[in-house]
Image (cartoon, rainbow, N blue to C red):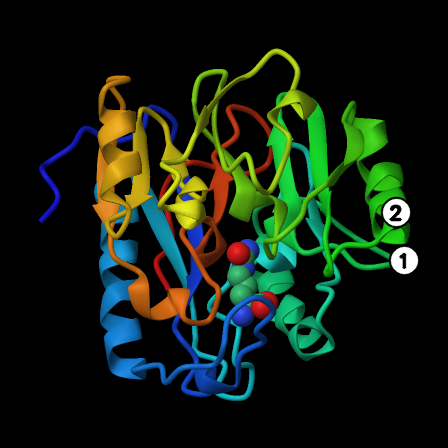
Amino acid sequence: MLAPSTPSPRLQRAITRDVSRAIARCELTHLERTPIDVDLARRQHAAYEAALERLGCTLVRLPEEPELPDSVFVEDTALVLDEVAVILRPGAASRQPETASVARALAALRPLVHLDAGTVDGGDVLRLDRTIYVGLSSRSSEAGIDSLSELVAPHGYEVRGVSVRGCLHLKSAVTEIAERLLLFNPEWVDAGTFAGWEALPVAPLEPQAANALRLGEHLLCQARFPRTAAQLATRGLRLEPVDLSELAKAEGALTCCSLLVTARSSGAETLAPFERT
Ligand code: CIR
């Protein structure tokens, strides 16, 4: 059980989607296929959603997509910035139909633009201030990065490609965990890429621990990586362990199961009332 927590300072919505009954047919790149217990995956996913709610998010829950095995991993379909939401083109063809329903949900919250060349998975996108780093992975292409760059440059963002190795996405290798602080796996990405940011390495026995989800002062981390959690605790981070071990068999982690949409202090979107779907 998570301890009661104060909400994140800025209200935000979290778009999520139920685990597909077809998840056994998910894309796999670095893992062997093993049986996935759909009911357990759904229970764990529900606990993840509950943690998001406890920490101040209002959920926008999209209905299950029975024919789209990886559709629970909504992060890969879009990049949400304060100014605009970019509807991406996932690198796996089986995942490209996932974007339509996410675009419909985002249309109420942000102006939309669409990647129109190449491919980019949201899991490859790490925004740090006004720089958007994109992993040069098997899913995200140079053409996609160029297209993204054209779409966000008018809003003052610079896009940079980043080499990654040995993992699915850039955010498998590195995530932002606190103010000017990153968590990373030195085997998969070079921390020197992120000038001006302190980078903590994961525990060597926990290579997949670098994917954590920052929610204001709180950090959702994966319960199955206690060594890394112990290191993070020494930094005074407010950890919220979550168990998504069943979705890990589909190469999913924490950031990939939600799209966070921060309420803007100005603009068309209003803070209340939040709709619940
Ligand atoms: C895939 O290979 O596309 C899915 N099985 C896993 C996607 C995980 N997404 C993410 O980390 N952003």
Q: Mark 2–mark 1 contact, CB under 8 Å?
A: yes
Pointer 1 residue Cβ closer than 8 Å to ligand 1 = no
Residue denoted by label 1: 117
User: What type is the residue that disc 1 sits on?
Assistant: Ala
Pointer 2 residue Cβ closer than 8 Å to ligand 1 = no
Q: Could you tell me which residue is drawn at 89 percent across and 39 percent down?
A: 150
The image quadrant in which ligand 1 is located:
bottom right
Q: Going by the image, does 122 lie left or right of 224?
A: right
**Image location of residue 263, percent across then percent down:** 47, 34
Distance of mark 2 from mark 1, alpha carbons?
Answer: 6 Å
Quarter residue 236 falls in: top left
Quarter residue 272 falls in: top left
Q: Going by the image, does 35 lie left or right of 165?
A: left
User: What type is the residue that disc 2 sits on?
Assistant: Ser
Density class for disc 1 (Cα within 10 Å; few <14, some 14-19, many ≥20) is some
Residue farthest toward the top in the current orientation of the protein = 196
**Image location of residue 15, percent across then percent down:** 46, 55
Question: Is residue 81 visible to us here?
Answer: no
Q: Is residue 268 above or below residue 68?
A: above
Q: Could you tell me which residue is drawn at 56 percent across and 81 percent down?
A: 68
**Image location of residue 35, percent across then percent down:** 36, 85
Q: Going by the image, does 228 lie left or right of 268?
A: left
Q: Nearer the viewer, residue 210 or 55?
A: 210
Q: Could you tell me which residue is drawn at 50 percent across and 42 percent down?
A: 261
